[in-house]
Image (cartoon, rainbow, N blue to C red):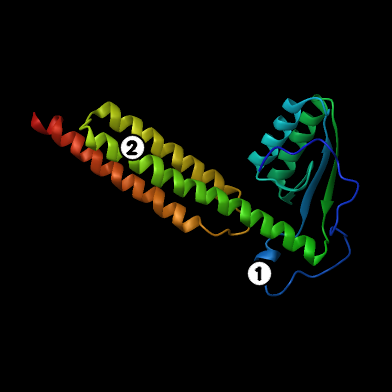
Amino acid sequence: MSAPSDGTPDTLSGMATRRTKAPTGNKRAAATDGWLLLIYKVPSESSRARVAVWRELKRLGGFYVQQAVCVLPDREELRAGMAKVREKVTELGGSSVFLTLTDVDADAREQFVEGFRSQSAKEYAEIVEECETKFVKEIEFERFRENYTFEEAEEIRQDLEKLRRWLAKVEGRDWMDADGKELARTKVADCESLLEEFEADVYERTEGKV
């Protein structure tokens, strides 16, 4: 998602706070009882400020409902994160309004849930792509050029650790049980198996000859 502009919308369509039950056909819609909504504005001449706020909210796992309007599930650690973002907005010369939504329309709840699910699903897909197009290809290339060295194996293991940390972060902010989690886990596990095989070959071609 591209960085949102600094304009704050005049209205938030579909977010009336009257009591409405979540649709019974979607169990994921009941995954949270409340929502944290941040509406903010930063100086229009500063793209750096807009990107800085956007980056921090995306790290928290925020879903942008509209430009400069971001929502998160109501959780203690996310409240703390939102507070820090508000401090950042103020430091950058902007302003913000923080709301806790406890009762929202069914349509708005569905929008939030599906937005978070789509967001997490895309992140899982990116991990799968990284495994298939970079990690696997890297090992194939090193085998092709017969670069069986400890240094190369260590470098590839660092890449594996990056994948693991990435997956952990995505899972940590996947509050709505998005599609793609199991496939991403499988692909990362496959990467580990490929690396272990490569490391075994490195050992046989170096230490194994001693």
Q: Position of residue 147 (x, y in %)?
A: 23, 30
Q: Does residue 175 appear anywhere in the picture?
A: no
Q: In this view, does 91 lie above or below 181?
A: above
Q: Which residue lies at the image location 12% right of the left edge and 34% below the top edge?
A: 208
Quadrant, the C terminus? top left
User: 79 and 88: which one is in front?
Assistant: 88
Q: Is residue 126 above or below residue 28?
A: above
Of mark 1 and mark 2, the one earlier in the sequence is: 1
Q: Mark 2 points at which residue?
A: 138
Q: Please give the residue where the numbered disc 1 appears in the rendered image.
A: 27
Number of residues whose C-alpha sits closer than 10 Å to that of mark 1, classed few (under 14), some (14–19) or many (20 or more): few
Residue at 75% x, 35% y: name it: 85
Q: What element carries label 1?
A: helix
Q: What is the tally of numbered marks visible in this picture? A: 2
**Which sits in the foreground, 15 or 88?**
15
Distance from Cα at disc 1 to Cα at disc 2: 41 Å
| Residue reaching furthest to the bottom | 24
User: For residue 5, what is the image quadrant?
Assistant: top right
SS class, disc 2: helix
Q: Residue 111: which quarter of the image? A: bottom right
